[in-house]
Each structure stands twice: as C-alpha cells, then as structure tokens.
Amino acid sequence: MRKLLKSAVIAAIATAVTMGATATSGAATMTKDPDPTLVVLRLPTQVQIKDGVAIVLSQETNKTTGYSWSIKVSGDKSAVKVHPGEYEAPAATGMVGVAGTTTWYIKALAPGQAVLKLVATPPGGGAGTVKNLTVTVTQ
C-alpha cells in the first residue's frame, strides 16, 4: 500500500513538471541519491531543474521479451551525468511475463540543455521504440 501511495505522489510530481513547473524539492528515495528532486515516469517530456539537482527516470521493462533499454545523450552532454540503468524485477506475483522496472539516476551538473533518448531495442537488433526526455539545467 505504501509503495502504491508513493507511486501516486511521484506521478503527480512528474505531471506537474511536465506542465511547465520547475522542480525544486522532493522526497523519493534512490540508492544513488538519498533525496532526488524529481521522479519521471512518463515520456516524452521535458523538465527544467537547477544545477546539482537529481532526477530518477523509471521505465517499465519486461526482460522476458528480449527488449532492452539504452540511453543516448545529445545536446549539451556536460549538463547531466546519467548513471547506468538498474533493473528491478517485479514483486513475486506468481504470474509469468510480468514487467519490472529499469531506473536511471540523472544528476544535473551545469547549465545547458541535454536530450536523453531512450531506445527500447527488440531482440536481434533492428529499429527500436524511442522516447525522449529533455533536461534543461539552470543555475
């Protein structure tokens, strides 16, 4: 129940930022940063954050399908640091094929604008699904 409530709060924050709000405080937990400012759950979107702020980006991942996520940063690459994605398996539900979550920790380093392109590559390669997160870092 607590996890469900936390997810609802996180979704509300992500929606507010998507609508143009600037992220300045937050209360989610992530191993790379004990208090990230923003958790992004839906893409495509854009966020504006201050230098030094942390973001957590989460995407549903079903490893049983063979698809995998990768991130490519374009634009001002020095504006952010993206830590490797961490996969979390779904809770033991007894259901086969249930998706887990891949989460990336992103730290704002300097003013600029970076575009994080998430690509879900199908098994065997080929063209994948692309989702963008545009991060504008201010002082």
Image (cartoon, rainbow, N blue to C red):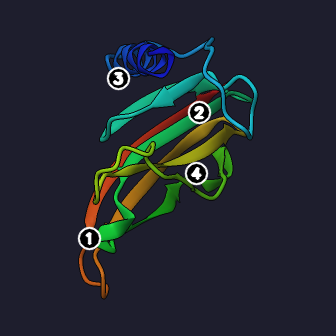
- Give yes or no for contact between labels 1 and 4 (Cβ–Cβ under 8 Å): no
> Are the residues at dot 1 and dot 2 in contact (C-beta closer than 8 Å)?
no
Viewer-side residue, 136 vs 69: 69
Inspect the image, locate mark 3, and give the three-letter code of the amino acid beneath it: Thr
Q: Tell me the residue at 51%/28% (across/down).
A: 39
Given the current orientation, which residue lies at the most extreme bottom position?
124
For label 2, the residue is: 55
39, above or below 73, in the image: above
**Mark 1 / mark 4, whichever is N-terminal:** 4
Mark 1 vs mark 3, CA separation in Å = 24 Å
To which residue does mark 3 refer?
18
Looking at the rendered structure, the kind of residue marked 2 is Ile
Which three-letter amino acid code belongs to the residue tagged 4?
A: Asp
Q: CA distance from mark 4 to mark 2?
A: 17 Å
Query: x and y percent of residue 29 in the render?
Result: 65, 26
Q: In front of the other: label 3 or label 2?
A: 2
